[in-house]
Image (cartoon, rainbow, N blue to C red):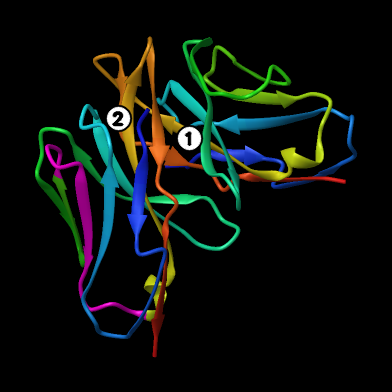
């Protein structure tokens, strides 16, 4: 059974550019969440998608956005990149049980470096 | 606001030792609690999931307990091995609005020495 797949694994971007990260969840999992991990702030929740709808959003600026497709694959976009956006971006997928997501499985992450 | 704390921040033990990692959370209204390990530069590997109605879960040499009323969980690792060296994270799942999210602790960095 394939795990959560994130692409690309590494990215280097320049300040002001935008970037799109992709996440393919485990087959049958319809809930996808995104997290940002930095040495200073640890792991912070970005947003959660289910059935192509954003159900929940963390405390991040509007430059961070996402979407989910009908096959449950998800993308997140960061516009006007800042140096502080350099981080490991992690995607997690879960199946739902009574509308609530169960065990979360994470991908290997995308390491974004903004220069 | 839910806050999750892990103590100690770092731990170094000799191989073969049994050890306990601690996790505490401020709001007992959680849906479940999950323990993960993270190797440097890698993603998170799920170790154990404890539902809010459960007291403990076991997988091999790992045992996790949950005391929701006191806001505490422990991860017990028996007979530690060098391959157990990693950062261990606990996360609580809380219900927010129409969805849910994981709130993570800052982790315990474990080193098991030969």
Name the quarter where the N terminus of chain A is drawn: top left
Q: x%, y% of residue B17?
A: 24, 82
State how far apart marks 1 and 2 are (Cα): 11 Å
Q: x%, y% of residue B35?
A: 32, 50
The secondary structure type at the circle numbered 1 is strand
Point out which mark residue A102 bears.
2
Please name the residue shown 88% across and 30% down the image. Answer: A17
* Chain under numbered label 2: A
Q: Is residue A94 above or below residue A68?
A: below
Q: x%, y% of residue A79?
A: 80, 24
Q: Which residue is mark 1?
A: A92
In the picture, measured across the screen, residue A49 lies left or right of residue A74, that is: left
Residue B72 lies in magenta, yes or no? Answer: yes
Q: Earlier in the sequence, mark 1 or mark 2?
A: 1
* Magenta-tinted stretch: B67-81
* Chain under numbered label 1: A
Give B25 or B54, whichever is nearer the viewer: B25
User: Which of the 4 quarters of the picture holds residue B80?
Assistant: bottom left
In the picture, measured across the screen, residue A16 lies left or right of residue B104, that is: right
Mark 2 neighbour class, 10 Å CA radius: few under 14, some 14 to 19, many 20 or more: many
């Amino acid at each position: 059974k394939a795990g959560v797949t994130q692409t690309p694994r590494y990215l280097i971007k320049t300040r002001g550019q935008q970037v799109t990260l992709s996440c393919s969840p485990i087959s049958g999992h319809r809930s996808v969440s995104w997290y940002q991990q930095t040495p200073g702030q640890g792991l912070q929740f970005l947003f959660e998608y289910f059935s192509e709808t954003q159900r929940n959003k963390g405390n991040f600026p509007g430059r961070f956005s996402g979407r989910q497709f009908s096959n449950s694959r998800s993308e997140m976009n960061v516009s006007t990149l800042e140096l502080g956006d350099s981080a490991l971006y992690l995607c997690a997928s879960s199946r739902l049980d009574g509308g609530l997501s169960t065990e979360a499985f994470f991908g290997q992450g995308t390491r974004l470096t903004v220069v | 606001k839910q806050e999750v704390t892990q103590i100690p921040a770092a731990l170094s033990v000799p191989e073969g030792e049994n050890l306990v990692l601690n996790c505490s959370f401020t709001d007992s209204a959680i849906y479940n609690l999950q323990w993960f390990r993270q190797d440097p530069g890698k993603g998170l590997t799920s170790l154990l999931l404890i539902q809010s109605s459960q007291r403990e879960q076991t997988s091999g040499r790992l045992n996790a307990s949950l005391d929701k009323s006191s806001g505490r969980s422990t991860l017990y690792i028996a007979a530690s091995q060098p391959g157990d060296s990693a950062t261990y994270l606990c996360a609580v799942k809380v219900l927010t609005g129409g969805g849910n999210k994981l709130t993570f602790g800052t982790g315990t960095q474990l080193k098991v020495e030969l």
